[in-house]
Every structure is written in structure tokens, then in C-alpha cells.
Image: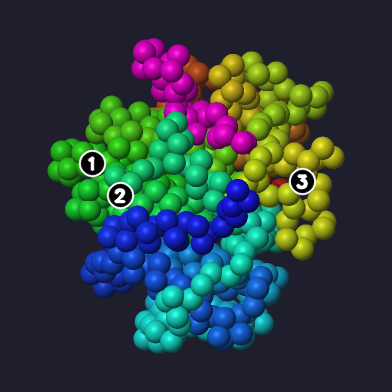
Amino acid sequence: MDYALTVDAIVRRAETLYAHKEVVTRRPDRSLHRTTYGDVCRRARALGSALSALGVERGDRVATLCWNTVEHLEAYLGVPTAGAVVHTLNLRLHPEEIAWIAGHAGDRVLIVDESLLPLAEQVVPHTRIEHVIVVGDQYEELVAGGDPAAPAAELAENEAAAMCYTSGTTARPKGVLYSHRALVLHSLASLANGLLGIGERDVVLPVVPMFHANAWGLPYTATLAGAAQILPGPHLDPQTLVETLEAERVTITGGVPTIWLGILQLLDSDPGRYDLSALRSMIVGGSAAPRALIEGFERRHGLHVCHAWGMTELAPLGTVAEPPSELAEQPDEERFAFRSTQGVPAPFVEIRARGQDGLVRWDGETMGELEVRGVWIASAYYDAPDAADRWTDDGWFRTGDIVTIDGHGAITIQDRSKDVIKSGGEWISSVALENALMAHPAVAEAAVIGIPDERWQERPLAAVVLRGEATADELRDFLAKDFAKWQLPERFEFLEEIPKTAVGKFRKTALRERYATPGAA
């Protein structure tokens, strides 16, 4: 049959089969709001109907400035079902940057959490947004005026359904449009064993924000599976998250490494206090997870970390590091080594790496820039013709990640192309140094950058946040067992905090401005 792969199909399935399953939101006052997929789906259709009555037309952008809440989930489902495009705005960006993104996307409507209204008031006057809908009484009035039985728009699967912008660490953010087909296939693949493996029996808590690459697709995937969803709202501190994981018997959760480093420290400080026995998978992505983090959760607390890699341009799932069958019975050393990679590509995602002299061998040693293609990977940025060089002449997306690929087909990200340290004609992986440093018991966080050197072009500098006592010489000796002398950091700088981007990654541009600029301290 010519069956359209659309978000509306996900809504119909959830309402038909899983109307009784729970969706829970932690409100700003810390109370829990409980509802079901049945109510969520009805309200999502009512929202879409009400937006159409406001004048929202096919393909129009409806922006959200929201935490992970049930209302945000209703927008995820209702806006695309009505034929419009849900555009998640990153609330952690500067107001000027949010306004630029909303203007570039052409957003017409904004749905905003009440707690974020002061931020919205700084943004909206500099955009073409016509309607601001505040979650609370205003949002409830809008939904009440819509038709919960409104038929879905006659959608084509290649129409745009959602939109996200890249983090823009080196230039203006770039918009990525996701088709209905891409979101449905991404969700379907995420159900598979060996990938995220989400099923109806699961209870899913996305810590990763819903404005960060669609929360890695978890809201759509969980809805398709009929898995219960626990949405943490603005409460992302380790204590509250761990208490929620325990109380709601969460089975799958996902977030960036900085979140899990804080949770690991909390669990280490009081082993056995929390019953997390229901938790079968902690998805870690957004940046490379240190091996010490993966081992720490499993060896000390019996918790499984699922290491994954993706990008906004990939919707975002690219690879997952679940060991293949040939490693299942191997010693822990080999299994942890594999799980510390970014893993093998998901179905319908193809990979290759290109070095300066052509395609890279799959030997686990030769480095090159990762290129990908697949069914949910963007073919262009929205209204950004100057960025067309991110795609090769034969249609592969150039990720900017410097990787090796091993015989299993697993990629290991050695660095971003802009972050790899070029020293004396050789490449030094800042990621490998960072992960090794964070295995030291006295190190809480570490970021490594290249600083100019007259003789060697660049040399490594390590910015370190300590949780114990250690000197530069001690840390250099600690690294020396795994790295050649010429790869060791030239300098160590001890900081109270490492600057981070809006999505929790180390902001190396700030470190370079401070340490790599001539005359900088």
C-alpha cells in the first residue's frame, strides 16, 4: 500500500493501543502532573485545530520555548499533524541569538512556558512572531477552543514536520528541517535491539532537552512504542533526577556526559542509597563519554551505559556502541574498549571516512573526517546556500568529526576537525587526552585545546577542574603510560569551571580566546 509515514500515524497508534499509558511532568513547583496518551493525543489534535483557526497554514513554523513537559509533547505531536512545522528554540542561548534563529526560520507563533516568559519578552519584539501563547491559562484556553476530533491534514511524508538549529559554536546556527518520513523512520529504528531498544514496557525519562535535536527522538520513539514518559521539566539537578529515576521506576533515560558525571558523583558519595534496579539503559551522547564514566556506572553501581553518537543534521541518531555478538563473551577490557567507541551505524545510516590522501582504511588507526548518508540525514541546511560545501559531490554529509573506524565498523571520534591538535605534522586527539584525564580520581572535568607553538605549530593545553588534589606533573605522569611523550599536554591550567555551550558541551572557543590567543593569560 502507499502508506504515508507521518507523525499522525504515531498519534493514531498511541491513542488506539496505549491510551491508558502514563505521561508524567514535573512542574516548576516540583509537583507531578499525571495524564495519559489518550488525553495527550486528543489535546494534540485540539491544539493543531486551534492553531489553524489562528491562521497557521501548511508549512508555517510554530516555535516552542519550553522545558520537557507534557505541553511540549502535545506540540511535538499536534503541530505536525496539523500540517505545520514545530520549531524548538534553545532556551539556553542568548536572547539576540534566539531572536535571530526565530527570524531566520520565519516563526509565526510561539508557545512558551510561563517561567520563560521574561526571556520570550526579550526575543519576540525582534521577530515576526504574531501570536505568543503562554503555557498555563492561555494555553489551556486555546486547546479548549480546538477540536479534539479534528481530522489530520492530508500530509505527504516528505513534508517538513519539525525544525532544529545547530548550536552555532563557530558561526551563525544553521536550520535543519526534518520530514515526517525521517522522524517516523528514525523512531522505528530506535525501537530495535542493538540500538536504543525502546519498547512498550519501558518508562522513558529524556533528560536531554526537547529543544536539543528533538531530545534525540525519544519523545517520538516512546510515543510510537507506547512507553510511559517521565518529563522532568526544569529540574535537572542530580538529586532530583536520581529521586525521579527511583520513584518512577524509569527503565531508559538519556542525557549528555556532564549530566551523568554529576549523577555518578552523587551515587559514589552514598552507594546503595537509591534503588535504581529498574534502570536498564542510560543513553549518553552529545559529546564523547569518558571510559571512566562508563566503567564507573557499571562496576560500582551495576548500571548500563549506552554510548551513542549523532548530530542535529542526523535527526540525530547515527551510531550506537552496543557490543556485537563476537564480543559478548570477551573479557571486560575488550567490551569496555568497544563501548567507549561511538559504535556502529544504525540501519540505513552509512559511514565512510576521508583522510588527506583519500578514503580511510577500517583499521582502527588511520584518522579521517567522517562522512555519512542515510534516510533521516539532512540533504541541505534551511536557507543557507553558503553551507553547501558540507555535502560532498556524491551526496554524503561531511560531519567535521575526525574518526577512526575499526574492523567491527565502529567509529571512534578522535576530535572535531577544528579541535584536533596539529603538532609537528602529526595529529593529537584532544578527546583521547580528555577521556584519559577524567579517569584520574582527582579530576572532575578536563578539556584539551591546541595552543600556538613556534616550533611544533601547536601543542596541547589541558584545562582541568579538580575534585581532589593533583599537580600538573602528577597528571602528566598519569597520562604517560598511555601516550607518547610528544602527545602529552605542554601546559595544565586548573579552573573552577570549564565554560560550556548551551547544550552542555565544553566551549573550547572560550578556552582558545583565553589561552591560545597571542598575549592571553
> Residue under circle 3?
390
Magenta segment, which residues?
A: 320-349
**Place of residue 122 in the rendered image (x, y in percent of width and height, measured from the top left):** 56, 81
How many marks are shown on the rendered structure?
A: 3
Residue 107 appears anywhere in the view: yes
Q: Are marks 2 and 1 in contact (CB under 8 Å)?
A: yes
> Residue under circle 1?
278
Q: Earlier in the sequence, mark 2 or mark 1?
A: 2
The amino acid beneath tag 3 is Arg
Residue 203 tag number: 2
User: Residue at left 76%, top 24%?
Assistant: 359
**Place of residue 2 in the rendered image (x, y in percent of width and height, measured from the top left):** 63, 51
Q: Are marks 2 and 3 in contact (CB under 8 Å)?
A: no
The residue lying toward the viewer, choosing from 387 and 250, is 250
Question: What is the secondary structure assignment of the residue under circle 1?
Answer: loop
Q: From the viewer's perspective, is 290 left or right of 270?
A: right
Q: From the viewer's perspective, is 198 left or right of 278?
A: right
The answer to which quarter of the image holds residue 409 is top right
The amino acid beneath tag 2 is Val
Find the distance from the CA under tag 1 to the CA under tag 3: 42 Å
Quick one: which residue is furthest to the front in this view? 1
The amino acid beneath tag 1 is Ala
Quick one: which residue is furthest to the right in this view? 393
